[in-house]
Image: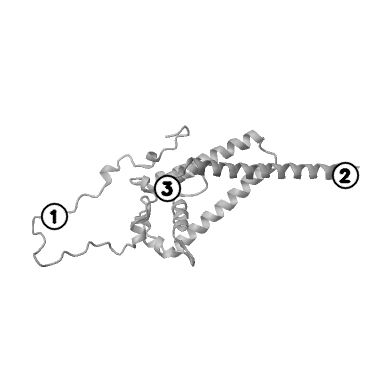
Amino acid sequence: MDEDGLDASRFEGDDAASDRDPEPAGAADEDSDGGSMPGVPDPDPQDDGVPEDVQKYARFKKMDGAQYDRVNEFLRDRTYITAREWAIARLCSDFRTETGVEMTKIGENLPELVPFMTDTYSPQAVNQARASFEEKVRTAGATFLYGAMCDFFTAEELDDVMYEATEVAKFLLEVEGVDLSVEEELEAEERISSVMREVREASEQLRAADLAESEADGE
């Protein structure tokens, strides 16, 4: 857990252990009734038709035992997005091909891919969540840039906003299983700082131009 209380364990239910499905009846007796028959090959293990890349998908493993409502509450407190939008946005990024996003594969295998998603989705539902995520990112971006450019925040306050946003974003990436090296973190922070410097410079230029125009009108 870090200073802001960002801890993946908070997503887990208080009674997660008691909610596990009991062992199917007769499972313990399967081996005692008879092993492999001589000369008869054992059947291949069943994978229920789950694609190989879905079986190997390693994101969200830190979320095993997490409950959707808890994940959703955490995100709602810190971002504009829901748990559904977060999960599907990551999947759309990971299951993208040259011809587009594999909406059908994502929807049909959603519970296999993300521990806190318990239902399958239609391709239309996946696309809807994807579009909702994109719209919220664009809206949040416009809101942030306006706040940065309208001189509402001081430079120090803006740095604080960026730091808090970066910490939440990094935490979500870590929970997904993204392994960020120190060099990658520093590079990302430098890119963000560079963008913010450009935003501040553009804001100062706009204010200077506005002031000059006002003075010209007053003459």
The location of residue 55, given as percent across then percent down, is 33, 57
Circle 2 crowding by C-alpha within 10 Å: few under 14, some 14–19, many from 20? few
Q: Residue at x 49, y 58 (%)?
A: 130
Q: Secondary structure at mark 2?
A: helix
Inter-mark Cα distance, 3 to 1 = 36 Å
Q: Residue at x 38, y 57 (%)?
A: 110
Asked if one can make out residue 132 in the rendered structure from this viewpoint, the answer is yes
Inter-mark Cα distance, 2 to 1 = 89 Å
The location of residue 200, given as percent across then percent down, is 69, 41
Q: Residue at x 39, y 63 (%)?
A: 105
Q: Which residue is mark 3?
A: 176
Q: Which residue is mark 1?
A: 26
Q: In the image, is 63 to the left or to the right of 30?
A: right
Q: Which residue is mark 2?
A: 216
Q: Earlier in the sequence, mark 3 or mark 1?
A: 1
Q: Quadrant of the N terminus?
A: top left
Q: Amino acid at mark 1?
A: Gly
